[in-house]
Image (tube, rainbow, N blue to C red):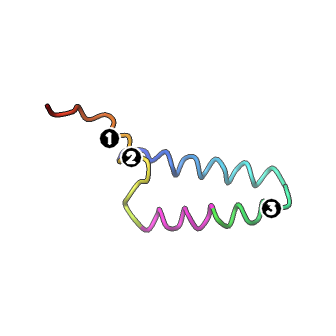
Amino acid sequence: MKPCFCRIILAILVIVFAWWHPEWAKYALTVIGVLLIILSLTTACCCRARLEAKAEPKKE
């Protein structure tokens, strides 16, 4: 299984917002949580397709 950097970034944001307490942190954590739930229900990765597309050599 290849890593999905989108999920890694979201997990880091959860940790940051859990320790840093601005007024809007609970809303940010809710949105991030919903995104993580949606990503966990699908096998798709939002960033992997872009990275693989860049890595493929162009056919001429």
For the view shown, which residue lies furthest in the left direction? 60
Q: CA distance from mark 1 to mark 3?
A: 35 Å
How far from the left and from the top, in percent, is residue 42? 40, 65
Disc 2 + disc 1, Cβ < 8 Å: yes
Residue 31, placed above or below residue 10: below
Number of residues whose C-alpha sits closer than 10 Å to that of mark 3, classed few (under 14), some (14–19) or many (20 or more): few
Residue 20, placed above or below residue 26: above
Residue at the location (31% across, 41% down)?
53
Question: Is residue 48 in the magenta section?
Answer: no
Task: Choose the circle earlier in sequence order: 1 or 3.
Answer: 3
Magenta stretch prevailing secondary structure: helix
Q: Which mark is residue 24?
A: 3
Magenta-colored span = 32-41
Residue with the mark numbered 1 = 52
Q: Is residue 51 left or right of residue 5?
A: left
Q: Is residue 18 left or right of residue 11?
A: right
